[in-house]
Image (spheres, rainbow, N blue to C red):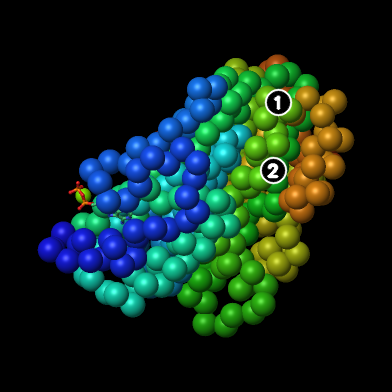
Amino acid sequence: MAANEFDLISRYFSALGPRQPGTRLAVGDDCALLQLPADQQLCVTTDTLVADVHFFADTAPEDIAWKSLAVNLSDIAAMGARPRWIQLALTLPEVDENWLAKFSQEFARKLRLHDCQLTGGDITRGPLSVTITAMGQIREGRALTRSGAQVDDLVIVTGSLGEAAAGLKYAHARTMTADRMNLVKRLQRPEPRVALAERLVGLATSAIDISDGLLADLGHILAASNVGAELDIEQLPLSPSLIICEGTDEARTLALSGGDDYELCFTLPSRHWQEVQTLARKLEVPVSRVGFIQEEPNLVCRLNRNLYEPQATGYQHFSKRGSALGN
Ligand code: ADP
Ligand code: MG
């Protein structure tokens, strides 16, 4: 970017988030230098949010900061890792210091909430987009991958599903009710389930974060684990606001096939269910048992014991990730 790139970096991005043990060098050199204890693995993910594709261009800078970080932390959570370091590549159409100040302040707040440090990045000129690389740590060989689901495991999801997809409909609605606002909030401010996920290591057999709808994302676990599942549609966690705004049928469809929830879906041997419920209660994260893993390699949905045919399948092998505008 222009010569004042260095001013912008030092003003807005030089020391965000709590310094992590193991940070030998952060913002200011050609690279950051990060050290992990010998028995730990680095868990790395990158996600890009592009204006008009993944968020409305008029989204508040605070909401963009929150969501861009949250979707990356959600991937770290899905591995059961502890997030530590963040790299931030910003593409900006213009230098708008008011925008940058708000973005940076909220970014710093979210970093503190999750005890992560910003260790570097880039700033370039172009259509607004935010690319984040999140790095976490996990004991060697302990990560929750997609491939470990076992026959008879329970299928568990956190939080409630479908709200973000409904929120997309109401983001620019002329009449805004409290319930619609709740839905829009879920679209703009997903809550990565990092704390619970870390505690699932050694208990869950596989995990994924739900960004493309439960059917699609559970589908990834099933394919990677070479198993199938049965889902009990009655057990889908649906919020009161979602049911009020959409009705139960549409709420179920959105829970199964809508995007942007950033809840966790994991598989769990039933002997650990009590323990996970206790843990979840302590961390104030709702958990719902929505089905079980079966040998037959397909995904069957049942409602009151009858076969249930989902309205729209989220199971798209080539769907783009985290795409709120459904590109
Ligand atoms: P280089 O030319 O070597 O890529 P830059 O001028 O892009 O260096 O960046 C200088 C320093 O500032 C580097 O340490 C880089 O990681 C950091 N940095 C640049 N942009 C950001 C940003 N948006 N957030 C955090 N750190 C940044
Ligand atoms: Mg650079």
- Relative to residue 179, is residue 32 depicted above or below? above
Q: Is residue 32 left or right of residue 282?
A: left
- Above-or-below relation of 310 to 153: below
Identify the mark at residue 202; answer none if there is no mark: 1
Q: Residues within 10 Å of mark 2 (few under 14, many from 20)?
A: many
Query: In this view of the protein, which residue sits in the foreground, 144 or 148?
Result: 144
| Residue 85 image label | none
Residue that badge 2 annotates: 196
Query: Residue 53, how many percent across, how many down?
Result: 36, 57
Q: Residue 304: horizontal and vertical position, in percent?
A: 84, 41
Q: Position of residue 303 (x, y in %)?
A: 79, 42
Can the viewer see residue 200? yes
Which kind of residue does numbered mark 1 sit on? Gly
Q: Residue at x 65, y 37 (%)?
A: 198
Secondary structure, mark 1, is: loop
Q: Residue at x 70, y 51 (%)?
A: 159
Q: Quadrant of the N terminus?
A: bottom left
Residue in front for this viewpoint, 139 or 240: 139
Mark 1 residue crowding within 10 angstroms, few (<14) / some (14–19) / many (20+) = few
The residue at the point 63 percent across, 42 percent down is 264
Question: Mark 1 or 2 closer to N-term?
Answer: 2
Residue closest to the eye, 137 or 246: 137
Q: CA distance from mark 1 to mark 2?
A: 12 Å
Q: Are marks 1 and 2 in contact (CB under 8 Å)?
A: no
Residue at left offset 79%, top offset 42%: 279
Which amino acid type is shown beneath numbered disc 2? Leu
Image: 99 above or below 162: below
